[in-house]
Amino acid sequence: MAKVTLNLLNMFALKIKKNTIEYEGRTVGEIISQFLAEYREKLNGSILSKNKKKLNPIMVILLNGKNITYLKNYKTELNDGDKLYLSFPISGG
């Protein structure tokens, strides 16, 4: 099991009232599952999927600065000291 830091950005930090949470897990999916089990009631429909069991697929998850979509998504394996970033997508101009 890898010890990782989940960094909450923008809407996540505002809803949870924390910037970081420490977790242990083997994959990104395990960490996100732990996070949702602990904080689901504080998250709203724009952040969660329709059934409220998963994150809305538009959420951005970065592992050490790389989007997990370009790795192995939720099956991406973790190492001790990895940093995950969870963000609501933001755009601007």
Image (tube, helix red, strand yellow):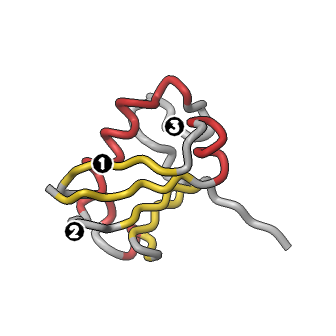
Q: Quadrant of the C terminus?
A: bottom right
Q: Is residue 30 shown left or right of residue 5? A: left
Q: Residue at x 35, y 46 (%)?
A: 32
10 Å crowding of disc 3: few (<14), some (14-19), many (20+): some
Q: Residue at x 23, y 66 (%)?
A: 80
Say what amino acid the circle numbered 3 marks: Leu
Q: Are marks 2 and 3 in contact (CB under 8 Å)?
A: no
Q: Residue most toward the right?
A: 93
**Relative vertical location of residue 27 with respect to residue 31 in this rendering, above or below:** below
The answer to which of marks 1 and 3 sits earlier in the sequence is: 1
Residue wearing tag 1: 23
**Relative vertical location of residue 24 with respect to residue 90 in this rendering, above or below:** above
Q: Secondary structure at mark 2?
A: loop
Residue wearing tag 2: 79
10 Å crowding of disc 2: few (<14), some (14-19), many (20+): some
The answer to which of marks 2 and 1 sits earlier in the sequence is: 1
Q: Nearer the viewer, residue 46 or 43?
A: 43
Which percent across, then down, holds residue 90? 70, 61
Q: Residue most toward the left?
A: 1
Q: Nearer the viewer, residue 51 or 77?
A: 77
Which percent across, then down, holds residue 42? 55, 27
Mark 1 against mark 3, which lies toward the viewer? Answer: 1
Which percent across, then down, holds residue 92? 81, 68
Say what amino acid the circle numbered 2 marks: Asn
Q: Secondary structure at mark 1?
A: strand
Distance between mark 2 and mark 1 Cα atoms: 12 Å
Say what amino acid the circle numbered 1 marks: Tyr
The answer to which of marks 2 and 3 sits earlier in the sequence is: 3
Q: Is residue 31 shown left or right of residue 15? A: left
Residue wearing tag 3: 48
Q: Residue most toward the top?
A: 41
Q: Residue at x 14, y 55 (%)?
A: 1
